[in-house]
Image (spheres, helix red, strand yellow):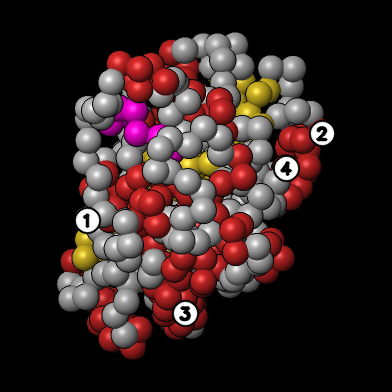
Amino acid sequence: MGRRPGHAKGHGPGVSQAGGGGTAEDAGGERSDATRLVTAGRRREWTGGIVNPPVWRASTILYGSVAELRAAGHDTHHRLFYGRRGTPTQWSLADALTELEPGAEGSFLYCSGVAAIAAALLSVLTPGDELLMVDSAYDPSRAMATGLLARMGIFTRFYDPMVGGRIADLIGERTRAILLESPGSLSFEVQDVPAIVAAAKARGVVTLLDNTWATPLLFPAIEKGIDLSIMACTKYVVGHSDAMLGSVTAAPGRFAALRDTSFQLGQIASPDDAWLGARGLRTMGVRLAHQGASALKIAKWLSARPEVARVLHPALPSCPGHEFFLRDFKGASGLFSFVLAGGSDAARAAMIDGLALFGIGYSWGGFESLALPVDPQKHRSVNRRDDAGPMVRLSIGLEDPDDLIADLDRGLARFAKT
Ligand SMILES: *Cc1c(COP(=O)(O)O)cnc(C)c1O
């Protein structure tokens, strides 16, 4: 859906590479992420001179003649062919995501993050293969492994998120791929990605990373050697809790299989949702910076509270893999968990129920703060967790962090009283 301009061939009429929209490549120089977020994907032939690429909705594409229809051929890259192959609205966002991952070949969009994970895995795995999946993976990724993949004869082994280079001991004859997620869902273990990538490359094993938490702005996954970088764009890219969207960005040599698999699965993100994603992307840098700073302030405040046993925030030493966070990440986003010091499920509910500024709901990465009771042990099979009390996950939004702290302060008082 969005190869780097340098890889593109066979542009249709009116789809030249010399458009004034501007990419880092045609400017011939390195731009910082902040600047790329503004310029990426805005080719003039797609925007028509409008600042934001408009919504191109289509199923049928009309050709001028039978000869033109035949001449169109089947290389549909950045070429209007049929609605399922996309329009400039989706190509623009896919290209922008590719530009944000230094070294990437191309990106494909999906109707959700889970659809992106499925397509990425299916582009690599064949019946009889083995997949190694991190034990702290997003629960629907686990469900995909134990459900769909198992039915297809693909066997999954779960591994300790802190395995690091010892992953080499788990790689067997049939191991074809390793799924990483760093930090892990709910419990935020930061993985030693370079060590795992090195072990995988030595054995010809493909690495896939769910990079939803960091985005390429905080962890440029392809540059770090990952083969397929997956994002639930539903979270920080869309950023406003009003659309579902996923993406996979591929390292060189991995895009063709990803695109073919996605086409065969009939995958397409709607132009309207892609447009919302592109709109969100422009402000993702400033949102992440604000939300990241607020979340860290709140995490530090929580870690000094007697009602809190442990804060699981990658930028704090109390989080497993903190040293890898310091070494590999450019910063933290706005999602973390904390463990209460003892207390019951009812006490946790009393704390969360009375919060005035935090919504109670799934998903995260929007402009508004959320609080969620989480129980990671239900979704683990490798290690038993030994948490001191119930756990709460917070997604910090764009509110004033001091207002959020005051809200949490009253929440912890309710928890202590229950
Ligand atoms: C939400 C989420 C997903 C799935 O994204 P959807 O768009 O909800 O399907 C995948 N991975 C992680 C880490 C997530 O938090």
Q: Is mark 4 within 8 Å of ligand 1?
A: no
Question: Going by the image, does 49 lie left or right of 7?
Answer: left
**Residue 212, image x, y percentages:** 46, 52
* Mark whose residue sits in front, 3 or 1: 1
The answer to whether any part of residue 357 appears in the image is yes
Q: Amino acid at mark 3?
A: Ala
Marks 1 and 4, the one that precedes in the sequence: 4
Determine whether the residue tagged by mark 2 lies in a helix, strand or loop. Answer: helix
Determine whether the residue tagged by mark 1 lies in a helix, strand or loop. Answer: loop
Residue range (magenta): 78-84
Instruction: Determine which residue is flagged by label 4.
Output: 197
Q: Which mark is residue 202?
A: 2
CA–CA distance in space, label 3 to label 4: 29 Å
Q: Amino acid at mark 2?
A: Ala
Q: Compared with residue 298, is residue 324 higher up or lower down, i.e. above or below?
A: above
- Crowding at dot 3, Cα within 10 Å, few <14 / some 14-19 / many 20+, comes out as some
Instruction: Determine which residue is flagged by label 3.
Output: 293
Determine whether the residue tagged by mark 4 lies in a helix, strand or loop. Answer: helix
Marks 3 and 4, the one that precedes in the sequence: 4
Image quadrant in which the N terminus is located = top left
